[in-house]
Image (tube, rainbow, N blue to C red):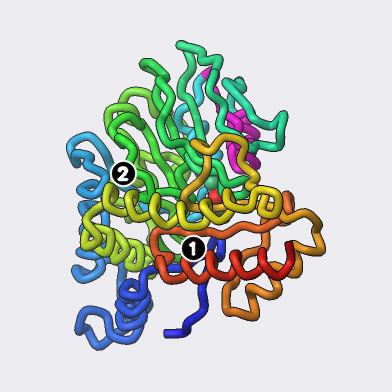
Amino acid sequence: MSKTHNFNAGPAILPVDVVKETAEAVLNFNGTGMGLMEVSHRSKEFDAVMVDAQNDLLKIMNLSPADYDVLFLGGGASMQFLMVPYNFLHTKADYILTGVWAKKAYKEGKYFGTANVAATSEDTNFNYIPKTYKFDPEADFVHLTTNNTIYGTEWKSIPDVGNVPLVADMSSDFLGWDHDFNKFSLIYAGAQKNIGPSGATVVVVKKSWLEEKGKKDIPTMMNYKTHTENGSMFNTPPCLPVFAVGRTFKWIERQGGVAAIQEKNIAKAKIIYDVIDSYPEFYKGSVKNHEDRSLMNITWNLNTPELETKFINEAKAEKMIGLKGHRSVGGVRASTYNACPVESIQALAKFMEEFYKNNK
Ligand SMILES: *Cc1c(COP(=O)(O)O)cnc(C)c1O
């Protein structure tokens, strides 16, 4: 494998094992003498891939198959911005706005009814997680975004929403932080940040909520029930991404599960945050409160845009790529997803120390 240190925000680094297993399956899937892209999704070999992925995910999330269904849909997390309200917004829903992705979800909600803002951190360009909310106990659901990929903030604990169903976009920290997933009525995540290639979006939905509150009279492909009733194979699923995502779930199991991954992520992120905190006049962490700092996307600025460009270019020369901040905020962003090895993090920390000495 190449020695590039991959800090891309998404699509992003995957475990080496997963990449190798997927490459092998592309050539000869499960000893069939055919590549994974060349076999029917109705074959018993692919069916096992789908069912294993669904069961493994519920197991690592500590959810019961009696209570939750797992879907792998196309359209990205962006499609879920509209599928959630299409199925569940009858009159009004609460949205917590912690970034551009959350705002995009909120915008789609407005097409289906009243979308209320329960809290927002837009006043200071989303550099914190709000701690007070205005929840409506009558809302159809509360929507939040657990990790804000662009700004580098992350929810470490989930607010109490009472009996209102909780929906979360977990795209950029899915299976990176060990929430009590039973608290959620629906979770979705585009695979390409933390668990696989682009093309599959994971949806985990509580069966009883869908049964009781899911709208019946909506177009077939938009209806979650169409997909739950057909084992996520109403139409051709994204077969190759589902295979890769399934291998990532097995890799997570081998790592000791989500709790063990979370511990590793805490230790990994600390290495970079410690450098930032050692030279606060030089590396300016973008997130206001330390407890809101993301383990997945670490964001900071330097004193001038020129110095930031110099940092990013010199890092690239040392084979550290993907460090440019999102075009809407600038600065530097290191995405340190589950599969990012500690060796890459240590290399970046060492580079930051040297860059400080040479440019302070
Ligand atoms: C990247 C991202 C999205 C958009 O995902 P697509 O799969 O490209 O639609 C949505 N939400 C969050 C939190 C993201 O990081």
Q: Position of residue 347 (x, y in %)?
A: 50, 71
Magenta segment includes 4:
no
Q: Position of residue 64 (x, y in %)?
A: 19, 39
Front in this rendered view, residue 144 or 219: 144
The amino acid beneath tag 1 is Ser
Q: Could you tell me which residue is drawn at 46 percent across and 54 percent down? A: 269
Where are the magenta residues, as a range? 91-111
Magenta segment includes 107:
yes
Judged left or right of residue 291, residue 203 is left
Residue 228's mark?
A: 2
Number of numbered discs: 2
Q: Is residue 193 visible?
A: no
Residue 112's mark?
A: none
The amino acid beneath tag 2 is Thr
Q: Would the CB of label 1 be found within 8 Å of ligand 1?
A: yes
Front in this rendered view, residue 121 or 106: 121
> Mark 1: which secondary structure?
loop
Residue 198's mark?
A: 1
Residue lying furthest top: 137
Judged left or right of residue 316, residue 170 is left
Cα distance between the residues tagged 2 and 1: 21 Å
Q: Could you tell me which residue is drawn at 31 percent across and 36 percent down? A: 181
